Image: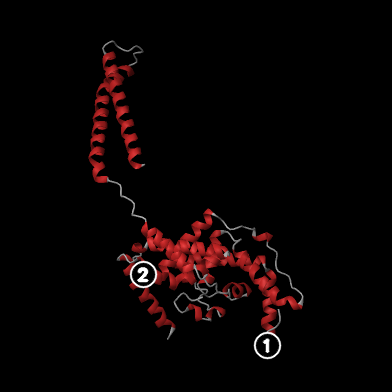
Amino acid sequence: MRHDSDRETNTEMERPKMKSATKVDAIDRILAAEEELIPSSGFLAAAMERVRDKAAVPASIPFPWKRVAPGLVLAAGVIGWGAWVAAQFAWPALGEFAQSSPQIPVAAVPSLQEAGWVALAFAVSLGSWMLSWRIVRG
Amino acid sequence: MTLISTHARAEASDLVEVERVLAGDTEAFEGIVRRWQGPLVNMAWRYCRDRARAEEMAQEAFVRAWRGLAGWRRESSFSTWLFALAANVYRSELKRFPTVDVPLEEIAEPVSAAHQYEAVAEQRRCEVVRRAVLALPMRYREPVILYYFHEMDVGAAARTMELPEGTVKARLARGRELLRKRFPHLNEADAKATSTVLSTGREAPR
């Protein structure tokens, strides 16, 4: 089978050319001499109809990265700041907790409470950011 | 008109029409569809052996080609790019909706028929062998399909599959071996026919 424009008048299909060093046998003869299928008369029109349909559909709107970028940067800043503050509060408290003292010292309680609030704020920020991201992405 | 000049003319037409389509003239794509509809439908036919489905798959390939025309980097000829794209489309279509797969072992070898039915029997024998290709595992099936579609040109089949020639050759050899094992008597019948032609100069009835 030739793959150029004059293929319909070409009869070379019946005489397969050997471009490899393999021996031609019955399998080759049968598989190479397959009759050519002529596309149905409406094929061209149907294919072009599908192409026109696709062409008529407006191009999808690209994601507005420029508009989203400041929000992303802000959100990342807030999250980073929250994490830093949380670490500042939580680290001494954790250190004290780790010093084989089974009881939480009275002095550490306010710090832990503050750290809890910071962690909560951090979680709410993260949740809100993920929700808005999901809404924007559809 | 020689084949080479016809081929060069087709390539030139492809280039002109691709440029026009890229410039926004959708109608210019009609020339491309007109020129390549035959090869793409025939290629799809070999993947599924269902005429309606082959045309459907070929149409999908044309739509994808139209969409991805800007992605053709002109490193290879337009036909090479188009065949590779079509092969991808056909492969994924058949993954989504496979052809009815009959295990190779369950395909009966064609037996000799009564003399008056030999032409019909020969046709049937060929069709059974062609359909048996669809029963090959996909990794061997595709090289076999594309090798014979490209007139037994391993290089062209490899370019369409976007695989190294060596890989295609190895898979092709395995695929043909599986078919030969499934139809051991085909070669005997063929050899008998060939020897009759050589000794009498006339084709032997099969």
Residue reaching furthest right?
B114
Residue at (40, 59) in percent of width and height: A53
Q: Is residue B67 above or below residue B118?
A: above
Q: Which of marks 2 and 1 is in front?
A: 2
Q: Quadrant of residue A33?
A: bottom right
Relative image position of residue A126 (x, y in whole percent): 31, 31
Q: Tell me the kind of residue under disc 1.
A: Arg
Tell me the SS state at disc 2: helix
Residue at (69, 88) in percent of width and height: B199
Relative image position of residue B24 (x, y in whole percent): 31, 64
Q: Check disc 1 and report the residue beneath it.
A: B202
Q: Nearer the viewer, residue A132 or A18?
A: A132
Relative image position of residue B126 (x, y in whole percent): 64, 71
Q: Check disc 2 and report the residue beneath it.
A: B28
Query: Who comes first in sequence, dot 2 or dot 1?
Result: 2
Q: Nearer the viewer, residue B171 or B92?
A: B92
Q: Indicate the chain on which mark 1 is placed.
A: B
Q: Quadrant of the N terminus of chain B?
A: bottom left
The image shows a total of numbered marks equal to 2
Q: In which quarter of the image is residue B30?
A: bottom left
Residues tagged 2 and 1 counted as in contact (Cβ below 8 A): no
Local crowd size for mark 2, using a 10 Å CA cut-off: few (<14), some (14–19), many (≥20): some
Q: In this view, does A102 lie above or below B106?
A: above
Q: Tell me the kind of residue under disc 2.
A: Ala
Q: Quadrant of residue B11?
A: bottom left
How far apart in space, not on screen, are marks 2 and 1 (Cα)? Answer: 50 Å
Q: Indicate the chain on which mark 2 is placed.
A: B
